[in-house]
Every structure is written in C-alpha cells, then in structure tokens.
Amino acid sequence: MCLAIPAAVTKILPDEMAVVSIDGVGKEISVALIEDLAVGDYVIIHVGYALTKIDPEEARRTLDLLRELSVE
Amino acid sequence: MSLAFRSEIEITVWLAGCSIVDVAILPRSRPAVMRLFAGKPASSVLSVLPRLFSLCAVAQQVAYLSAVEAARGEDAAAETVQRRVTAVVAERLTELVRGLFVRQLAFDGTGAEAVRALMHAATVLGGVASEGAREGAMREAVSQIKSAVTALGTTRETQCPEPGRAPAAAHLARFNAQALSLPAIEQSFLSVADDPDVIARLLTEGASFSGAPELHGRIPETGVWARRGGREQILALDAGPAERLKARLAEVARLLAWLDDAERDLEDGVIASYSLGNQRGAAAVECARGRLYHAIELDDEDRIVRFQLLAPTEWNFHARGPLVQSLKGSRLAAGPRGQDAVRTFVGSFDPCVSFNLNFHEAGRA
C-alpha cells in the first residue's frame, strides 16, 4: 500500500525543484509534474516527486487520518 | 503525534564477487486500516480511501465498492461495471507511464508536460467514467491521453517506443543486457483463478496472510509481467529489466487500444466480486501494480465488522517471493553499471513502489 502523505512546500528552488516539510522534516523534491506551485501549498509526494496539489484543509484531514493510523 | 510510517521497502543484496548470493527484504509499515474502519458505516469509508491511497485511488474505491455490494448481496448494473473498468484502465495506464519516468529519467520539458497532461486527462476520465453517461467528455479525455502517450514515444500501433522518439525509446536504450544476467527460474503468476483461495485465506487468517501471502508454497508474481504471462504461454524464464519494461510499454499500447474500443479483449477479472454470505463480500481489481483484494464483513446496520486489504506489493516483494527468487544466483557487472541494472530490475516489478537498495559483500558486516 502506498499511503498518500501530504507535504507543505517551504521553498521553491531552481530547475523545478522545491523543499517540502513532511511532518516537520525537510526534503528536496522535484515539482516537474506540478504547475504554478507556491510556498505554503500542499502536495502529495511519491518517490521524490510531487504528484498532485491538494488544498490545506484536505491535507489537514489526511494528516489527521494518518496520525490515527500510526498510533500503536 | 508523528507519522510513524516506514514508507519505503528496504532491499539488501548480498554479493560474492559478481554473484548475488542472497536478498533480504524489509517491508514497509502496514498501517492497521481495519482499526480505522471498524464500526464505521460502510458508506462513510469510500471518500476516505483516496485520502489514504493517492496512487491507486480508483482501484481502491472500486475494490471497496464491489466488496461492499457483494456483502450486501447487491449486483452492480452492467453499465456501472463498465464505467468502473474504464476508470481502472485509465488509472492503470497513467501509473504505468508515470512510473517509467518519475524514477528513471530526468524530465525534459516535453516529457514533463506530456506526463502532466496524461495525469490530468486520466483524472478527468476517471471522474467522467464514475459519473457516467457523458460520452463526449470521455472521448475527449481518451483523445488527450493518446496525445500525451504518443508524445512520450509510444503509440497503440507500435506496441513499443519508436526508434529515436524520446523519451521512451531513450529510456529503453539505456538498458544493457550484459549488466545483469538472471537465472532461469520457474515462474508463477497470480490470476483470477486464485481469487477464491486468496479471499478465503484473507478472511480466515487476516493480517498474517495479507502481510506475507503464500498459496500452498506458491508465491506468485502479479502485475504487468504476470498479466502478459496470462496471455502468452511462453515467457523468457530469465527475462531482465528491458524485457519487463517492453512488456509495460506493450500493455500501455493495449490499454490505449482498449480505451478506443472497449469491445476488445482485456485480461480476465479486471474487476471481480464475490458474495460470500452472512454479509461478507470480497473483490479483486487488476490495477497497475497487480491484483488488489478487499474483503469485508458488515453487520445488520451496514457497519464494518471486518475489513482486510491485500496489496499486490506483498506478493512481488515477499521475502521469498518472485523478486528475491529472480535475483538470487544472478550475476551482475562490476560497479555502478551492475547495481543500476539491479535497481532497474527491482523497479520493473512495480511501477510505483518506493524502495531503498543496498549492496553488501557476503561475509562482511
């Protein structure tokens, strides 16, 4: 199962790259598959690529769901 | 509260010189979805699935809907099933194409634009197919998908990338057959014929089966190569990454042709559902990565009593499964060339899987 983990864009880099924050952890990813991305947007990432942009409320609900799943 | 998931499969390859003597696989975390769904009304879960599973959201929703209907003893109308198959095919096509590029190639402008267009058109098609009865919109979405895939170098006519047409042809040209020599092994493929056995085991054994599935000593492969194996009796027993990727491109071409003409044959059991009595039902959906199973039990108020999910990855990346069996005994070229070939081979088992690959000399800590 590939879970969809939302990440917040914290910095736009040259060459269609960006830095995102996944649950507080920074990661550099490619944003070649997304157009018109800005700092503060939320994206779904997979194998180092942002695949889709989602709205912040959807991201929050998804993160809540994932936290509920990750409780041991 | 943090997200305590291990989202990548850890693969360790043990080498003795240029030979692979062992392969160890540490699976990803398997979140307890049942815990999240237990006691919830069956109808409330459908909208949650795309939030959890972004890569195969359509397949997950179709598997869930089909299993729930089976548990309720309902039959979906033929037109509904056809719309679902179309949506599953569109998603499968997108993931097969996207998987070729996101891991292997640096995008050039054309490639990135074409993949973006493909993802957008497939999303539109999935939505239209779900809503139904909008032939014009569906034809437009199919047309956009064909344009995008053609721009990437594959057409429904050629069945494989046209020489010189970037980026798909360039992608295949990268593979050097000499870099990885695989042993000839007996292959076993998961198919619709296995569904009853898989579902029975899923319901009786639950997570212990779905985490490491095995059918009486058999751990079959699922996905593109297995689907091809279901159509063609003879497949190279030592097929390497190039053959597997050609099979993926050929499937893209077949799916494009099917989207043009849904009367054409697709493989059996793209969507299969099973009413099991006592408000239990199951379904299997053939998605990009292979056969996905959902099994569910409802109570008298349509709430979820039991839910099990078996992802295709669990077969292919089983600790004793097809990937491990294929790699053991292989010989690889020295240095990065051989390691790259192994990496490509691992990726060829699944268009979406996220993994870390490590190499160690056997006998060294």
Image (cartoon, grey):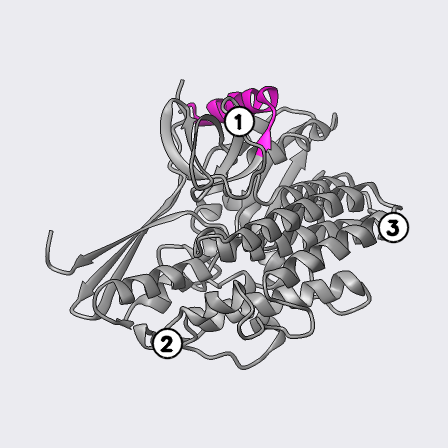
Q: Say few, some or many: other residues with alpha carbon within 10 Å of mark 1 (under 14 / 14 to 19 / 20 or more).
A: few
Q: Which residue corresponds to mark 2?
A: B177
Q: Is residue B58 magenta?
A: no
Q: Say if mark 3 contacts mark 2, CB within 8 Å.
A: no
Image location of residue B318, percent across then percent down = 40, 55
Q: Amino acid at mark 3?
A: Gly
Residue ID for mark 3: B136
Q: CA distance from mark 1 to mark 3?
A: 34 Å
Q: Return the residue found at the far bottom.
A: B234
* Numbered disc in front, either 1 or 3: 1
Say which amino acid is labelled 1: Ala
Q: Disc 1 marks which residue?
A: A38
Q: Residue at x 43, y 58 (%)?
A: B347
Q: Chain of mark 3?
A: B
Contact between marks 1 and 3 (CB within 8 A): the answer is: no
Task: Measure the alpha-carbon separation of dots 2 and 1.
Answer: 43 Å
Q: Could you tell me what secondary structure mostly forms the magenta stretch?
A: helix
Viewer-closest of B74 and A45: A45
Say what amino acid the circle numbered 2 marks: Ala
Report the quarter where the N terminus of chain B lies: top left
Q: Say whether residue B27 is left or right of residue B261.
A: left
* Residue B1 drawn above or below residue B330: above
Label 3 crowd bin: few (<14), some (14–19), many (20+), radius 10 Å: few
